[in-house]
Amino acid sequence: MSLTSPAQVQVTSPAAAARRWTARSWPELNNPAAWIVALILLIMPLIANGFFLIEIFGTTMILGIIALSLMFLAGYGGMVSLMQLTIAGFAGYMYAIFGVSGHPNISMGWPWWLATPMALALATIFGTLGGALAVRTAGIYTIMITLAIAAAFYFFTNQNYVIFNGHTGINNIATPHFLNVDWRSDIPFYYVVLAVAALCYLAVEYLSRAPFGLALQGVRDNPRRMAALGFNVNAHRVAAYAFASFVASLAGILQVWNYRQISPGSVGVEGCIDILIIAIVGGITRPVGPFIGALIFVILRTFALDFLVKIGLDGNRFRLLIGLGFLAVVFWSSDGMIGLWERWQRRNRSGAMQAKGTPGHG
């Protein structure tokens, strides 16, 4: 029997253990560029007006959160879901129905702090049930089932006037007011959206390295082998849909707070396709990809519209520019803008190494 001397015992302080756990769970926090981006986002209200703060950066983060939920399913679970915008819209409708709006015959008048968790819970259940149907299929059939759910919900909200007020939708939805702050005013709302986006991003990053996320990636790569090892494949997939639905629901609440209204146009099939394009253009394998894709999409949607009108074309043709950009990115990179960036970095490193290895000329 061997005894360990006190000198051989390594005592780890809680702070050191916390630093190691943080570095292991979120290695991006060691990247100086991440801290620079975080600093810029934090001081954005000092350098941007209300339009850029909400219509550009706020909308980018809201769409990015929805695309992030799709990225989690597709990138880590191998499941392409076209109903993530529908889940966000469902949360928005539930908030409008349980909360306060300009339609007292529809809305129940609950305060925002009761309507919000109720809407999140119902939307998460809705998305989980849709996921439970989708996981029984694979490939194109999963896409078609989720697209069918999205289309069915759109037509139901468009034609139902008792609950959803038909194509007009629900307007004048109340937003949070507490601590003597109107949290829908530009600067407070921007920081609320930024905080939610950051938490969702960190949660996805953490789960990707947690046992659940690693098992989900194993299910994506080889479901038969994971089943043989004792993992419940469908349970992991349904749990992934539940988490992704909760993330999308958060974005749905923020979207309703942003516009103070919701209508069937908010959950249209075109919008569902837009979320897929955002995720793919940014990069479907990294959590930061959806936010990059959302920024590109919002900038094109906002400024390309005016540009096309100025040159005498129909403003709705901005989708043509988005489509052409989508084709170009997919053609040159299988991982969106992130893949193009990494390819450019590798090319620069390779060129630098070749330059160092090349003998100089006297």
Image: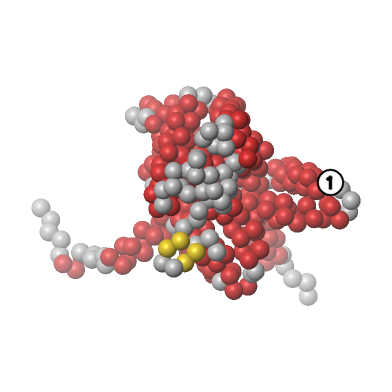
Residue closest to the eye, 8 or 16:
16
Quadrant that contains the C terminus: bottom right
Q: How is the image coloured?
A: secondary structure
Residue closest to the eye, 26 or 280:
280
Residue shown at 57% from the left, 44% from the top: 170
Question: In the drawing, does residue 322 fall left or right of residue 140?
Answer: right
Residue shown at 70% from the left, 42% from the top: 330
Q: What percent of the width, then of the height, locates residue 36? A: 56, 68
Relative to 2, does residue 73 appear above or below in the rendering?
above
Relative to 338, does residue 141 appear above or below in the rendering?
above
SS of the residue at dot 1? Answer: loop
Q: In the current view of this chain or complex, which residue is farthest to the front?
A: 105
Q: Is residue 99 visible?
A: yes
Q: What percent of the width, then of the height, locates residue 155? A: 61, 30
Q: What percent of the width, then of the height, locates residue 185? A: 55, 64
Specify the quadrant of the image occupied by residue 347. Answer: bottom right
Mark 1 burial class by Cα count in 10 Å: few <14, some 14-19, many 20+: few
Residue closest to the eye, 314 or 133:
314
Q: What percent of the width, then of the height, locates residue 65? A: 54, 50
- The residue indicated by pointer 1 is 314
Relative to 107, does residue 221 appear above or below in the rendering?
above
Q: Amino acid at mark 1?
A: Asp
Residue shown at 71% from the left, 65% from the top: 355
Specify the quadrant of the image occupied by residue 2. Answer: bottom left
Q: Is residue 243 visible?
A: no
Residue closest to the eye, 13 or 358:
13
Specify the quadrant of the image occupied by residue 326. Answer: top right
Q: In the current view of this chain or complex, which residue is farthest to the right?
A: 312
